[in-house]
Image: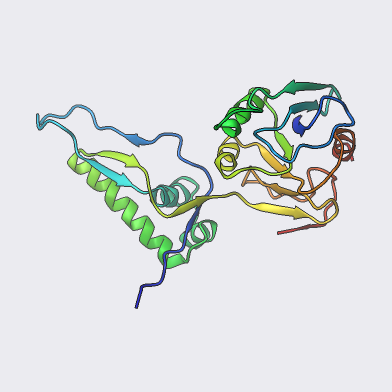
Amino acid sequence: MSPRPIRLRKISNPPVISGFKPYGNNKKSGKTESIFLHLEEYESLRLCDHEMLNHSQAAESMAVSRPTLTRIYSKARKKIAEALVTGKQIIIEGGKIYYDSEWLKCNTCSCFFNNPDKQKKIKECPLCGSNNLSN
Amino acid sequence: MKVAITSSGNTMESKLDQRFGRCSFFVIYDSETKGMEFIPNPNKDAQEGAGPASVQLVASRNVSKIISGEFGIKIKSLIDSLKIQMIALKDSDKSINEVIEMLNH
């Protein structure tokens, strides 16, 4: 039997940089190795340690279950710790993800719009001003 | 607050263009001064990359909302990261005049 397919993780914004490079290497061992930090792991770090959400809130925002989020998060911490300790460079790339922000529909003028600012809740339609909205 | 609207012509009676990247004109409407500006889209006949190039053009005018028929997958995340609000009016044959009237609700 084939395993249950991986659920796509929802990511709100792509990271502003694509990785980190170590500097001041004492050992002259030539090329630095790299670690691939997946985008979903980056997002879990952003939600848990930057936005200070708890795991269940972060899980909801990434459209996965709470245990899955915790697994992604611990993987992210493990990878970053390994990079810091062994002096590897971090490349933020890959992962089963899709980008999306919250989309709403106005029932009066039947337009769709998104919410770019996650701090604020949208109460009325930005186009016609009606408050008859649905998800 | 500035709003960008995709237009199929350069008059107030022109219809809202259903495509974002390859629309004919962008209307930049300023809701405070009520002024507007028609910008011909240089990416209208671009082979590829019309969407991201158009986003750059619109974003350089500091708009906070974009109204169009649809937004492609390439630019949704781009516009999202620029914190611009997207408003999609699917299958509507509203003119620029009507859209601006709705904005001034």
- Residue sitting farthest toward the left: A28
Q: Position of residue A124 (x, y in %)?
A: 79, 49
Quadrant, the C terminus of chain A: bottom right
Q: Is residue B47 above or below residue A86?
A: above
Q: Is residue A65 above or below residue A20?
A: below
Q: Residue at x 80, y 53 (%)?
A: A110
* Residue A113 percent coordinates (x, y): 71, 47
x and y percentages locating residue B21 in the rendered image: 65, 34
Q: Residue at x 16, y 32 (%)?
A: A31
Q: In front here: A122 or B105?
A: B105
Residue A134, by quadrant, is bottom right
| Position in image of residue B16 (x %, y %) | 80, 37
| A1 and A101: which is toward the camera | A1
Q: Is residue A97 above or below residue B72?
A: below
Q: Would residue B46 be found to the left or right of residue B28 on screen?
A: left
Residue at (83, 26) in percent of width and height: B32
Quadrant of residue B7 within the rendered picture = top right
Q: Quadrant of the N terminus of chain A?
A: bottom left
Q: Residue furthest bottom?
A: A1
Total label count?
Answer: 0
Q: Residue at x 86, y 41 (%)?
A: B94
Colour scheme: rainbow
- Judge from the rendering whether residue B47 lies leftward or rightward of residue B63; answer left or right: left
Closer to the camera in the image, A71 or A37: A37
B50 on left or right of A68: right
Q: Is residue B3 left or right of residue A116?
A: right
Locate residue A84: give its quadrant: top left
